[in-house]
């Protein structure tokens, strides 16, 4: 029984110690991925412009006690982005 508990304690200790290295490995991969895409979106390397236009027309017509409402809503959105190669 003592041998089993010592073996189990050694396995748990090894897993706890490995957790640090696994966490560091994952953070290193994340940093490598972010450095790969980072320069594309760095300040000064990216310029963008957006133009929004919205027209709303409402007309009402009253005839013989009835009111007719016509609504026209037009929206335009133009977006452009330029990425300067590093």
Image: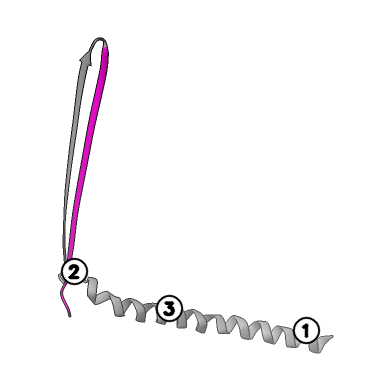
- Left or right: 14 in relation to 56: right
How far is disc 2 from disc 3 in space, using C-alphas?
24 Å
Reply yes or no: does residue 3 show up in magenta.
no
77 lies above or below 71 = below
Out of 41 and 28, give the one closest to the viewer: 41
Say the numbered circle drawn on residue 5.
Answer: 1
For numbered disc 2, what is the local secondary structure? Answer: loop
Which image quarter: residue 70? top left
Out of 52 and 48, give the one closest to the viewer: 52
Out of 79 and 45, give the one closest to the viewer: 79
Say the numbered circle drawn on residue 43.
Answer: 2
31 lies above or below 57 = below
Density class for disc 2 (Cα within 10 Å; few <14, some 14-19, many ≥20) is few
Which image quarter: residue 5? bottom right
72 lies above or below 36 = above
Give coordinates of residue 47: x percent, y percent: 15, 65
Give coordinates of residue 10: x percent, y percent: 69, 87
Who's the residue at 60% across and 80% down the image? 16
> What is the span of residues highlighted in magenta in the rendered image?
66-86
For numbered disc 3, what is the local secondary structure? Answer: helix
Q: If the image is split into quadrants, where does the C terminus sit?
A: bottom left
Who's the residue at 25% across and 24% down the image? 69
* Residue located beneath label 3 in the image: 27
78 lies above or below 58 = below
Density class for disc 1 (Cα within 10 Å; few <14, some 14-19, many ≥20) is few
Who's the residue at 23% across and 31% down the image? 71
Which numbered disc, 1 or 2, marks the residue closer to the eye? 2
Say the numbered circle drawn on residue 73.
Answer: none
1 or 2: tag closer to the N-terminus: 1
How far is disc 1 from disc 2 in space, using C-alphas?
57 Å
Reply yes or no: does residue 73 show up in magenta.
yes
């Amino acid at each position: 029984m003592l041998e089993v508990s010592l073996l189990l304690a050694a396995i748990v200790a090894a897993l706890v110690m490995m957790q640090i290295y696994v966490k560091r490995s994952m953070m290193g991969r994340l940093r490598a991925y972010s450095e790969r895409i980072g320069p594309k979106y760095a300040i000064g390397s990216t310029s963008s412009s957006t133009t929004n236009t919205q027209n709303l027309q409402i007309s009402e017509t009253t005839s013989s006690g009835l009111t007719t409402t016509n609504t026209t809503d037009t929206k335009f959105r133009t977006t452009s982005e330029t990425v300067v190669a590093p």
